[in-house]
């Protein structure tokens, strides 16, 4: 009997196997059954991927199409700048928020041991043959991994596994900072771009395909920008570390703001290349900043004025009516957007502008946000200068990002507002918010997408037309906003009543009670659910393929399998589906891993 | 500052905001509803400086998106030809890739000027939907494909598929045609419906169905790509449906419709005379007066009356090519040839025919 064997009691590995895999007869059965299923499907997948019928060049050759669709070649620098901005910010935050955790050399070897052992196991288990269906319907077995090739890979990986097995017990006092180790891993990946070769297709100057297809090294237009971006990332990592050592406090506020503004800046200015005319800047933007700057100054200056207390409610109502009027009038978009910001200031101001210092800071924040908002809206609402054959610069993965990021951005405040509205004591607001949440949540996303693409134009006044992407964005905001609202409501209900009472007891006004006491605690408890919801909306964004937007899924399933020139990729849809599954998996996996670390740092579930 | 003056200042600034109207740069595009009625699409397009052409973007050899995002193909070439006729520059096209569900809505809403998206000319589409169809550029028809090893040959008929399973894409006329056709000859078939034709093809290759059916052009293309000329047969010889494909434009817009029609006719006439983009400069207009009139040799009165440049059709042939060039460039690589088919010249027994230019 397995449990009586000495190995399974004394040896730590043996104990683990006994305790975890064969603890009872039913668990032994489950272990064998699951193991068989995993190995069987793994062999099936490998057979599918290495099948000579597959044409993986259809993926590699169309990589640019996948990422940016028809983005013009001469403006590629803008794409790299967009990626670079995110990487630089990443480097800066890794440096600044470096937790100082370290890993020993033995720990690194332990990880490498696991990786190489898994690789050796996978290669040992890989199938030798796979079935190819001939045109006449007969099935023929084809060798996909010759024995010598298998040995050629298996040998070194076994040697490495053994080497790491002994090295992992090494006792060296040197500790390595985890952040630096991770950056080195990233660097190794970038460095490998110089050496690895991928199957792709090369065409000569007349557009004729050069045969035979060799494995080609990665183009210099790919690895040179990545190298530059990596160097930039390293540079900002060290700047971040320096700022952390110097203890520059303001950075801990600036970095989150920069992360928030970065996608907005990328999509409105860098990626888009907006056509900005100076006369609109002078006729709309500068007057807007001046007017709202003065109004904001007055609001901040007199918000705690005793004598104005009587007029506060009429003024608030007046501003609300005015903002509705501003929205209905055919005004410049900048005025409408700034009006929303002004309403926010009107609410915030009595709580913050209580001292002279508070007023000064709020005014600075107000002016800066006015400039930032105007700048972003000027970029976003202008026409683009880029010319593409399809008329839209967003397509492929850039469209997926656009939908995912802006879907989240717009839906979060909307969800928060709906959740607060649903828990409100005012019946009208509560009924409206509950109605919106329940209606939006009880209809499938695809139905809403069709609503956006076909029906929304019917509901809008005659002649008013939104771009399809904007319509989808508005709709996504409502859809994921309704889900967010329910998550946030769950968080709100988890806050004990004593918190509300305590906030009341120290004389906080309703705004301060909600936003300084309740919401921060509520959000903290629902971070895992929110991350799950963001991942869902990232994946759901591929559904827009159904209503005719060229996102990454539509390119893979419709566009590439239709290509006949210059290379015939007709009917190559299975390869695309495999690639897309892998691609989405990588992003969502990394994302959920990061969020798990984030949860740990916040100490969730430990309080 | 007193309360009153403060309120006054607030109100004044509100008024200042409310007065700053600048509708020109609105994100919301406010279109003039009567635009389409008062002006011809032709004037609108000429004023705009480029033509908006609705294509599929994922139809093999008709309008496909290349690895660099450019759009090529038989339908795309006719978009280029329209631009060449209007502006003397074939590149003045903005493509809009449309799904089959949204193509007519998009045309009716004015998002596109002309729809060249392998669209079949049918009575209901022509009469009920407010569209007009231009001359047919490609005569297609639904056919079936099966394996020779299952006893199928190119001389098979619908009766031969009795008891076999047939793969097709769901909810299309393709599905309706095969069900009706099989019912008429009394063949019982198992219909396997999938969303896209490529999925039907995957099932056919995997042996999940014996027969696959769609438009003949797609079947010929897939047979050529899979190198199965000796293994798969396409039948019956005369297709089970008529699928004339051509450009579509909005009804009641004859000036614009004439331009589209005559761009197509010009490519066909040039093909009849054997005028290609290579030899269009050396055409003897005295020996062939019809070509002279078409290419604007004698003031090009025929073109200027239409609101085009005298050299409009010369530009079409010079920059895009004649019908045969457009056909061979896009359809020969996927195994579709003109010889002996419906798309051959009328003088060779085909259906490609144009009225005379005079």
Image (tube, coloured by chain):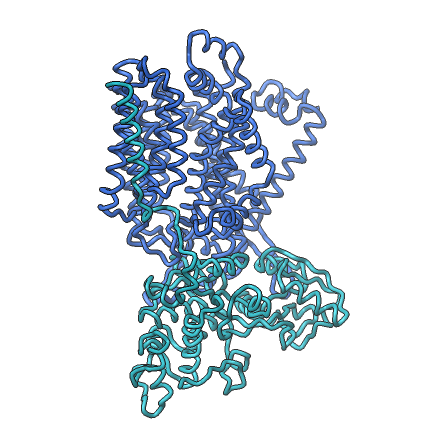
Chain colours: A blue, B cyan
x then y, percent, for residue B4: 28, 21
Q: Report whether B184 appears left or right of B41.
A: right
Occupied quadrant, residue A266: top left
The number of numbered badges drawn on the structure is 0
x then y, percent, for residue A199: 42, 54
Q: From the viewer's side, name the closer residue of A87 and B276.
A: B276
Occupied quadrant, residue A428: top right
x then y, percent, for residue A269: 30, 43
Residue positioned 42% across, 38% down in the render? A406
x then y, percent, for residue A224: 29, 46
Q: From the viewer's side, name the closer residue of A169 and B192.
A: B192
Q: The N terminus of chain B lies in which quarter of the figure?
A: top left
Q: Quick check: can you spot residue B34? A: yes
Q: From the viewer's side, name the closer residue of A94 and A261.
A: A261
Q: From the viewer's side, name the closer residue of B351 and B167.
A: B351
Of all residues, the one furthest to the bottom in this rendering is B287
Residue positioned 63% across, 27% down in the render? A21
Rendered position, A49 above or below B288: above
Of all residues, the one furthest to the top in this rendering is A505
Q: The C terminus of chain B lies in which quarter of the figure?
A: bottom left
Rendered position, B132 above or below A504: below
């Amino acid at each position: 009997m397995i449990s009586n064997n000495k190995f399974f009691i004394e040896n730590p590995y043996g104990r683990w196997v006994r305790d975890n895999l064969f603890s009872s007869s039913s668990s032994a059965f489950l272990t064998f059954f699951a193991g068989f299923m995993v190995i069987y499907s793994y062999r099936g997948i490998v057979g599918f991927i290495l099948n000579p019928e597959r044409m993986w060049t259809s993926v590699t050759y169309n990589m640019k199409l996948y990422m940016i669709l028809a983005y013009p070649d001469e403006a590629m620098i803008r794409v790299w700048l967009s990626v670079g901005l995110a990487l630089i910010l990443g480097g800066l935050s890794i440096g600044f928020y470096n937790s100082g955790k370290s890993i020993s050399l033995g720990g690194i070897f332990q990880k490498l041991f696991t990786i190489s052992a898994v690789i050796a196991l996978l290669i040992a288990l890989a199938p030798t043959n796979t079935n190819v269906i001939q045109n006449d319907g007969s099935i023929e077995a084809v060798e996909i991994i010759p024995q010598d090739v298998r040995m050629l890979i298996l040998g070194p990986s076994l040697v490495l596994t053994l080497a790491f097995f002994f090295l992992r017990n090494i006792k060296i006092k040197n500790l390595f900072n985890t952040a630096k180790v991770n950056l080195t891993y990233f660097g190794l990946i970038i460095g490998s771009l110089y050496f690895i070769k991928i199957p792709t297709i090369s065409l000569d100057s007349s557009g004729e395909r050069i045969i035979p297809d060799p494995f080609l090294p990665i183009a210099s237009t790919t690895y040179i920008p990545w190298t530059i971006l990596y160097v930039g990332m390293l540079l900002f990592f060290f700047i971040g570390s320096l700022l952390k050592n110097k203890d520059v406090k303001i950075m801990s506020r600036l970095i989150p703001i920069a992360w928030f503004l970065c996608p907005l800046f990328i999509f409105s200015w860098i990626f888009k290349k907006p056509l900005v005319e100076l006369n609109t800047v002078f006729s709309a933007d500068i007057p807007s900043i001046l007017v709202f700057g003065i109004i904001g100054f007055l609001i901040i200056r007199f918000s705690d004025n005793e004598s104005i207390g009587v007029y506060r409610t009429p003024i608030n109502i007046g501003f609300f009516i005015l903002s509705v009027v501003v929205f209905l009038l055919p005004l410049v978009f900048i005025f409408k957007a700034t009006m929303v910001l002004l309403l926010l200031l009107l609410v915030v101001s009595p709580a913050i502008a209580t001292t002279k210092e508070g007023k000064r800071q709020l005014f600075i924040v107000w002016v800066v946000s006015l400039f930032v908002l105007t700048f972003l809206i000027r970029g976003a609402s202008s026409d683009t200068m880029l010319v593409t054959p399809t008329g839209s610069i967003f397509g492929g993965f850039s469209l997926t990002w656009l939908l995912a990021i802006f879907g989240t951005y717009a839906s979060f405040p909307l969800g928060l507002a709906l959740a607060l509205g649903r828990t409100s004591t005012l019946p009208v607001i509560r009924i409206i918010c509950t109605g919106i949440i329940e209606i939006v949540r009880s209809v499938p996303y695809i139905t809403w997408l069709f609503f956006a693409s076909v029906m929304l134009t019917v509901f809008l006044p005659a002649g008013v037309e939104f771009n399809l992407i904007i319509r989808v964005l508005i709709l996504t905001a409502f859809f994921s906003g309704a889900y967010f609202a329910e998550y946030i409501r769950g968080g709100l209900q988890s806050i004990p009543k004593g918190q509300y009472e305590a906030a009341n007891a120290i004389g906080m006004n309703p705004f301060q009670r909600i936003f300084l006491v309740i919401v921060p605690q509520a959000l903290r408890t629902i971070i895992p659910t929110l991350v799950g919801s963001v991942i869902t909306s990232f994946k759901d964004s591929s559904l827009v393929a159904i209503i005719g937007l060229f996102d990454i899924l539509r390119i893979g399933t419709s566009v590439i399998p239709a290509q006949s020139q210059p290379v015939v990729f007709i009917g190559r849809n299975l390869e695309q589906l495999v690639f897309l599954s892998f691609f989405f998996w990588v992003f969502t996996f990394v994302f959920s891993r990061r969020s798990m670390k984030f949860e740990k740092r916040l100490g969730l579930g430990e309080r | 500052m007193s309360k009153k003056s403060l309120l006054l200042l607030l109100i004044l600034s509100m008024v200042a905001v409310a007065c700053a109207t600048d509708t020109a740069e609105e994100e919301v595009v406010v279109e003039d509803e009567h635009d389409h009625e008062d002006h011809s699409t032709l004037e609108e397009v000429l004023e705009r400086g480029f033509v908006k052409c609705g294509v599929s973007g994922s139809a093999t050899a008709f309008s496909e998106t290349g690895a660099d995002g450019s759009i090529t193909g038989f339908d795309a070439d006719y978009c280029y030809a329209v631009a060449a006729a209007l502006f003397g520059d074939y590149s003045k096209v903005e493509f809009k890739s449309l799904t089959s569900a949204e193509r007519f809505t998009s045309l009716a809403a004015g998002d596109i000027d002309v729809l060249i998206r392998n669209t079949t000319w049918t009575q209901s589409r022509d009469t009920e939907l407010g569209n007009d169809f231009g001359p047919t550029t490609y005569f297609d028809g639904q056919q079936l494909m099966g394996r020779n090893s299952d006893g199928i040959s190119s001389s098979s008929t619908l009766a031969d598929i009795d008891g076999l399973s047939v793969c097709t894409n769901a909810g299309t006329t393709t599905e309706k045609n095969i069900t009706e056709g099989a019912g008429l000859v009394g063949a019982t078939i198992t219909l396997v419906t999938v969303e896209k034709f490529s999925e039907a093809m995957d099932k056919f290759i995997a042996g999940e169905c014996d027969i696959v059916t769609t438009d003949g052009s797609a079947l010929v293309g897939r047979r050529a790509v899979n190198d199965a000329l000796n293994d798969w047969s396409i039948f019956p010889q005369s297709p089970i449906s008529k699928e004339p494909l051509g450009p579509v434009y909005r009804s009641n817009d004859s000036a614009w419709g004439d331009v589209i029609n005559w761009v197509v006719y010009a490519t066909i006439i040039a093909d009849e005379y054997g005028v290609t983009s290579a030899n269009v400069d050396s055409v003897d207009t005295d020996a062939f007066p019809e070509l002279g009139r078409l290419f604007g040799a004698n003031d090009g009165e025929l073109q200027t009356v239409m609101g085009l440049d005298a050299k409009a059709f010369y530009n079409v042939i010079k920059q895009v090519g004649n019908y045969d060039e457009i056909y061979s460039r896009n359809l020969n690589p996927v195994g579709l040839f003109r010889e002996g088919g419906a798309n051959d010249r009328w003088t060779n027994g085909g259906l490609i025919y144009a009225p005379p230019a005079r």
